[in-house]
Amino acid sequence: MEKDYLNEESRDGYVKIDRYNESKIEAVATHYKDILSQLGENPEREGLLKTPERVAKALQYLTHGYDLKPDEILKSAMFEEDYSQMVVVKDIEVYSMCEHHMLPFFGKAHIAYIPNGHIVGLSKIPRVVDAFARRLQVQERLTNEIRDCIQNTLNPMGVAVVMECRHLCMAMRGVQKQNSVTTTSAFTGTFLSNDKTRAEFLRLITASLD
């Protein structure tokens, strides 16, 4: 059962509406109450009374990509257009959860495609990134999934994806290297076969408009 939780405080005409599956929230919250106890905390103390529910809601939001269909997002705004030059959307914010430790990783995605009879509404590309990122992920798979979705749906002459992220599983635990950045890339079509096209994409994503 899905229920809208309305924030009754409206500021500047804005009312926050969150959608959660109530039964899932209750089930996950119960487990987190047990986890708090196992960690040596008292889940009944004031500061933690609502923490299991808050965590359950946060996790449901952070993994809502499982309920989305990225290919349908693209199909909803595909247009026939006689344009065959590179389209680049860069500096797309990425927030995801590492499936190994369930800690966040975040950064930017840079995406390009070369149309082959169809273009797509520009806002749909960041939406596709979010649809895959809002799941338990590894950066390598996330990069490939974005590439494959655009290639298989739009059938362009080529797709390029570069992703740069910081991983809290490296910064907060383990090796504890706070300044390390992981870069992944994935290409199809012209971006694979033509060095000049790939080089142009890499130049464009590093260029500044200032």
Image (spheres, rainbow, N blue to C red):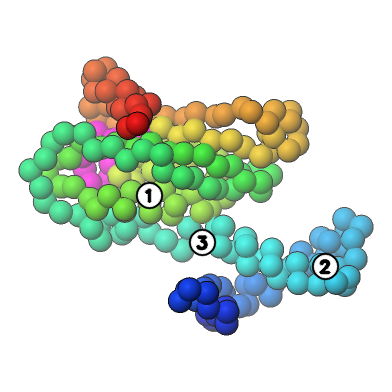
Can you give x and y, in whole percent of width and height, for residue 131 in the image?
A: 43, 54
Identify the element where label 1 is drawn: helix
Mark 1 or 2: in front is: 2
The amino acid type, in three-letter code, at marker 2 is Gly
Residue at image point 62% right, 46% down: 104
Could you say which is closer to the camera, residue 44 or residue 11? 11
Quadrant for the C terminus, please: top left
- Compared with 198, 134 (above or below) is below
Taking the spot 58% from the left edge, 64% from the top edge, the residue there is 60
Cα separation, mark 1 vs mark 2, equals 36 Å
Dot in front, 1 or 3: 1
User: Left or right: 43 with respect to 168?
Assistant: right
- Compared to 162, does 22 lie above or below? below
Drawn side of residue 154 relative to residue 127, left or right: left
Q: Is residue 158 magenta?
A: yes
The residue stretch that appears in magenta: 151-161
For residue 126, which numbered disc appears in the image? 1
N-terminal-most mark, 1 or 2 = 2
Q: Residue furthest top?
A: 195
Look at mark 2 in the image and give the residue it sits on. 47
Q: Do callouts 2 and 3 mark residues in contact (Cβ within 8 Å)?
A: no
As for residue 181 lying within the magenta part, the answer is: no
Badge 3: how crowded within 10 Å, few (<14), some, or many (20+)?
some
* Residue 107 point in image, percent of width and height: 51, 39
